[in-house]
């Protein structure tokens, strides 16, 4: 990896921001999250209940080719659906994501 960005610069893409975040192995028991992808496919993955929601963003960047290539996305959960980016440092448990579904949509700016 090259040098870190100079003071306070934002990462160029979501892929840059989350590519090196440690997702960790899938625990046998943990917060079960169903991810509904833009193409309609569903992925179910467990995360540590006390792990940060940031790991979910990292999982998507590290496992989806388009996200890995830098295509920006939004994750929404709950009813009405709420963007999870504001809870990125919360835990799966504190954000009520255990047993929940998360919708992934491509961001259109």
Image (tube, helix red, strand yellow):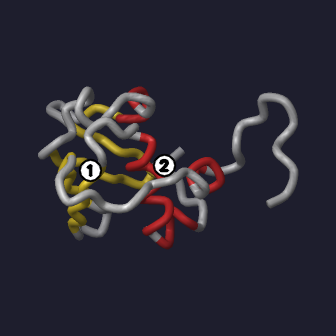
Neighbor class of circle 2 (other Cα within 10 Å; few <14, some 14-19, many 20+) is: few
Residue drawn where x is 49% and y is 72% of the image: 65
Compared to residue 86, the image places residue 60 above or below, namely below
Say which residue label 1 marks: 103
Q: Secondary structure at mark 2?
A: loop
Say which residue label 2 marks: 108
Q: Which of labels 2 and 1 is toward the front? A: 1
Residue drawn where x is 49% and y is 64% of the image: 62
Q: Quadrant of the C terminus?
A: top right
Viewer-closest of 13 and 105: 13
Viewer-closest of 109 and 75: 75
Q: Secondary structure at mark 1?
A: strand
**What is the quadrant of residue 84 in the picture?**
top left
Residue drawn where x is 78% and y is 34% of the image: 9
Q: Quadrant of the N terminus?
A: bottom right
Q: Position of residue 70 (x, y in %)?
A: 60, 60
């Amino acid at each position: 990896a090259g040098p870190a960005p100079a003071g306070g610069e934002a990462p160029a893409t979501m892929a840059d921001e989350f590519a090196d975040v440690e997702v960790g192995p899938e625990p046998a028991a943990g917060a079960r999250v169903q991810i509904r992808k833009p193409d309609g496919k569903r992925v179910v993955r467990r995360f540590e209940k006390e792990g940060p929601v940031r790991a979910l963003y990292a999982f998507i960047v590290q496992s989806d080719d388009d996200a890995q290539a830098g295509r920006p996305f939004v994750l929404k959960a709950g009813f009405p659906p709420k963007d999870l980016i504001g809870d990125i440092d919360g835990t799966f448990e504190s954000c009520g994501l255990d047993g929940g579904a998360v919708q992934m949509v491509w961001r259109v700016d």
